[in-house]
Image (spheres, rainbow, N blue to C red):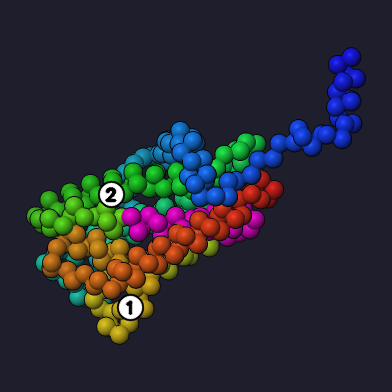
Amino acid sequence: MFRTKVKQLLSSSKLGEFDLVIEPNKTTGDFILELLKFRELFFFLAWKDILVRYKQTVVGAAWSIIRPLLSMVVFTVIFGRVAKLPTEGTAPYPIMVFSALLPWQYFANSMQQSADSVQRASGMISKIYFPRLILPTSAVLVCVVDFLISFAMLCVLMVIYKFVPSPYIVLLPVFFIPATMTALGVGYWFAAVGVRYRDFRHIMPFIVQFGMYVSPVGFSSSVIPERWRLIYSLNPMVGVIDGFRWCIQGTEVSLYPPAFAISIITSLVIFWYGLRFFRKTEKSFADFI
């Protein structure tokens, strides 16, 4: 009798009434509420990434210190000793470089982790529904932990060189926010494109390497001619890096307000476009993953 009723149900013209269609919310308000609803999943994925990142590694979290430390040595030798580029203020060259490496490596790591997050969670995407935006966003929290560890190393360098930071150091979060927005915007875009075109992930290292050399990491942005400063500031990390140096060195470093304003606008545009593109394409992730 049960089988008969099932057959009658399947053959019924009202079968469409039992269809279940799951798709991303289109309105901004519903979308934000959905993210809040899945907040526990957000923190769980972030914590899982932190554990996996340092599991079965030789030095563990020390990589967060070793990488910027080695980069600082290379930049100090190439730009400070060989090229002898001018510096601003009285801060030692290693501190000037390390204070720029902090936001840059946070941005680069966040962008790469966000871009790879969707492909790493292909099993979840193909089986269950949840806001896909949680994946690239939660990946950034791992990089925040790395940033804090590297910042502790900067404090150690200040003690070694007997350098007293500026009181403006409390304003670092102001410049931390646009770096995060830029990393998420680029990460959203690459995460969405990488689902359909897997070879896009191989472009990321070249972008990071090229971006580091065109950003004022190993040198001060004051070496850029005045007529090119605004165009150069279209790189959103220029204002962020200059802001970090200003927070640490104080008025000894000149903060170029137009550059910071342009960097803020650029970071907002990148974040908005990356978010919009991700949400527009996320409905087809399960088909290509």
Instruction: Write down the quadrant of residue 193 in the picture.
Output: bottom right
User: Where residue 156 appears, x then y in whole percent?
Assistant: 17, 49
> Magenta segment: does it hold 25?
no
Camera-side mark, 1 or 2 = 1
**What crowding class fits label 1: few (fewer than 14 Cα within 10 Å), some (14-19), or many (20 or more)?**
some
Which mark is drawn over residue 207? none
- Is the residue 265 above or below the residue 192 in the image? below
Q: Residue at x 41, y 62 (%)?
A: 268
> Camera-side residue: 45 or 105?
45
Quarter of the view holding residue 168: bottom left
Q: Is residue 199 magenta?
A: yes
Mark 1 to mark 2: distance in Å? 30 Å
Residue on which the image places disc 2: 150
> Is 50 located above or below residue 284 in the figure?
above
Which is nearer the eye, 90 or 172? 172
Is 152 left, or right, of 117 in this rendering? left
Compared across the picture, whether 81 is left or right of 41 comes to left
Q: Amino acid at mark 1?
A: Leu
Q: Observer-nearest residue: 108 or 56? A: 108
Task: Categorize mark 2 by other alpha carbons within 10 Å: few (<14), some (14-19), many (20+).
Answer: many
Tell me the chief SS of the magenta region. helix
The segment highlighted magenta reads 177-202
Q: Position of residue 171 (x, y in %)?
A: 21, 55
What residue does disc 1 label?
Answer: 230
- x, y percent for residue 116: 52, 50
Identified at 50% across, 59% down, the residue is 274
Earlier in the chain: of badge 1 and badge 2, it is: 2
State whether residue 87 appears in this view.
yes
Q: Amino acid at mark 2?
A: Ser
Q: Give the residue drawn at x 37%, y 67%.
A: 265
